[in-house]
Amino acid sequence: MLKIGNHEFSSRLLLGTGKFPDFDVQKEAVNVSGTEILTFAVRRMNIFDPEQPNFLEKLDASKYTLLPNTAGAKTAEEAVRIAKLAKASGLCDMIKVEVIGDFKTLLPDPVETLRASEILLNEGFTVLPYASDDVLLAKKLEDLGVHAIMPGASPIGSGLGIINPLNISLIVEQATIPVIVDAGIGSPADAALAMELGADGVLLNTAVSGAEDPVKMAKAMKLAIEAGRLGYEAGRIPKRRYATASSPLEGMSV
Ligand SMILES: CC(=O)[C@@H](O)[C@H](O)COP(=O)(O)O
């Protein structure tokens, strides 16, 4: 069970809704992924203009928890404004804080992310900040009182996978709140690794929406996340420098 603030989920896959080839493919991919949480940029949602296309139009939104994110924000103030807009439009109290500091790498601004998280916590939001894989930043965010930490695997949309597994495992080790690896996942192996490192969930978008077959990839991600979690819970064998026989010969006469 993934518990974020007062919300509980069986699926550990959080899925982004953008960049699918069309809304039918998006709907089927979302469906087979088994996700219960869909994230979307509030700025892309035409909340106050029903004439504009609605990118969730084919989905039964009542079946999912919609996690608005503040993509497009460059400062804490912009992120807070976007979060309040989402709340005013009746979306849930959860907000993924995304404050981008550099539009070439799309890496999050740590200072503005901290500031936005603090303000939104004071406003009563359930706060999930998207951050770099910085171990101390993760600790500072947790100390502020955020409800989950979302360290990036690698830059958004890069598909590079987990660039620094050590940092992710250190973040997991110190955290007492859920750690959701977010952004940069390229393949099911990356998602499985995140889970094997002890992450509580994975948020991804491009790896599915940009796959040759997004529906098949959505299913693969679901299975990878389940397998990775199971492997983590089972406890992997330690890595050794030298071989140990799988069928020991000690005690055998021949
Ligand atoms: C959808 C969303 O929130 C993205 O900003 C997120 O970080 C996913 O990144 P990828 O597209 O690299 O999976």
Image (spheres, rainbow, N blue to C red):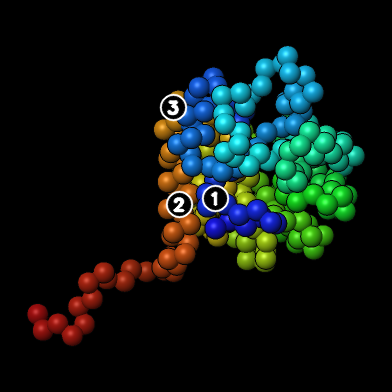
Q: Does residue 161 lie above or below 233 as drawn?
A: above
> Is 215 or 159 nearer to us in this picture?
215
Mark 2 or mark 3, earlier in chain:
3
Q: Which residue is denoted by mark 2 in the rendering?
A: 226
Percent position (x, y) of residue 250? 21, 82
Mark 1 secondary-structure assignment? loop
Q: Residue at x 61, y 23 (%)?
A: 57
Q: Which residue is denoted by mark 3 in the rendering?
A: 213
> Is 98 or 145 nearer to us in this picture?
145
Q: Which residue is denoted by mark 1 in the rendering?
A: 12
Q: Quadrant of the N terminus?
A: bottom right
Q: Left or right: 128 with respect to 252?
A: right
Mark 3 or mark 1, earlier in chain:
1
Real-space Cα separation, disc 3 to disc 1, in angstroms? 21 Å
Q: Which mark is residue 59?
A: none
Mark 2 or mark 1, earlier in chain:
1
Look at label 2 and name its amino acid. Answer: Glu
